[in-house]
Amino acid sequence: MSSDNSDGNLSVPLRNVLNSIQCIRDRVRDGESNESQGTFNLSNFWDTLNQAVKAVSQEATKLSLAFSRPPLPSVQDGEKLSESILKGVLTLSTVYYWLPKSQGVTLRRQVRDATVEVLEGVIQLLEVILSSPRQSLTQEQLTSTGGVWSACDRFVQLPQDNKAALLVVLTAQIGVVKDAIEEINQAVSEAQDPFSDVLDDDQDEDNPRGNRDTYWSERDRRVIDPCHGLMKAAAACLRKLASAVRANGDVGAPQSVAQLDDLADVSVEISPGVDDLALCLYPPMDYSGVENNVCKLAALLNKFLGMIRSSHVCGESELTWVQFLDGAVSHNLQKAKDLTAQDS
């Protein structure tokens, strides 16, 4: 058998399995879970899922090694390797579908994303093998193989239940909101001109930059204060909720699991709301735009606090800070509206 003929025949099973895994990836990304008819065992699910992930990692390694150096595998061995990686992927996707929504949409979403990441890693590896010269191990193939390993390793860090999944969401949101607040703090404290480090200021001393649109006026700075207060209230809401979930979060009852999902859905809206408000504070400040974003963020925080108040994570001790933050949101909202409504 000639090398060219062998190479061409080897491509057929690889391309077939590539197409199959792409279809599986799309179904996992967009599909629904199979709601369990009997009792669902979450511990058994994780054990089986981790075994399936380990098997995919091992099969991907075998596949990569087989095409990393001469001689190339025979057509028969190539077909076996393709069948083995496909079997591993099918098993992984099947086990993923075991996880019902009743265990939490937030949890299932994170398991889904991790599963898709593994499938996309295998797809990339197959594409690299098909497109690369097959007489040596390329850097691209090394990188793709490492990508599969990395995606598989992520599974040991996944949240094990919906309470932990919500905490993952909240931690991410807290980080984004903190960054937005620090950016505004830095811009306000460093200079009168927040764009001084990115705009050319090469005018002579007798003619300083005439474009006042790059500077905050005194009124602008007064408007920033309650907006900053509202952003800090948003950060406090997320931090306090995370503490309440750690202390009181329950995944034993369907209603509690659903409440955790609702809190996750609203919490992911907060950082975009904070970012929108922060961006409109930069000069030239449009007061109507500021008021619009202040009202949107305040309404979102009021909704969020109301959901926290009515959820199982809110006990008597949590009610104190919920009421305090509710008042802080109202105070900063009114102050911002008063300042933006003043005549220039």
Image (spheres, grey):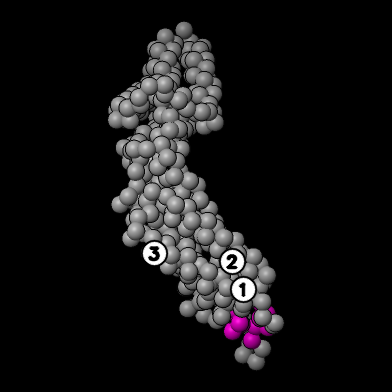
Q: How far apart are the two marked residues, 1 and 3, measured between alpha carbons?
A: 24 Å
Amino acid residing under circle 3? Trp
Q: Earlier in the sequence, mark 2 or mark 1?
A: 2
From where the camera sits, is residue 119 visible? yes
What crowding class fits label 3: few (fewer than 14 Cα within 10 Å), some (14-19), or many (20 or more)?
Answer: some
Taking 149 as reference, is 291 above or below it? below
The disc, 3 or 2, on the residue closer to the chain's N-terminal end is: 2
Residue position for label 2: 294
Q: Position of residue 241 (x, y in %)?
A: 39, 56
Q: Is residue 121 visible?
A: no
Please tell me how crowded label 2 is: few (under 14), some (14-19), or many (20+) other residues with Cα within 10 Å. Answer: many
Q: Is residue 136 above or below residue 114?
A: above
Residue visible at 43% across and 33% down in the picture = 102
Q: Are marks 2 and 1 in contact (CB under 8 Å)?
A: yes
The reply to whether the magenta stretch includes residue 140 is: no
The span picked out in magenta is: 208-220
Please tell me whether mark 1 sits on a helix, a strand or a loop. helix
User: Gap in Å between the C-alphas at discs 3 and 2?
Assistant: 21 Å
Kind of element beneath mark 2: helix
Image coordinates for residue 155, horizontal then vertical, percent: 35, 36
Q: CA distance from mark 2 to mark 1?
A: 8 Å
| Kind of residue at badge 2 | Val
The residue at which mark 3 appears reads as 321
User: Would you place residue 255 above or below residue 25 in this image?
Assistant: below
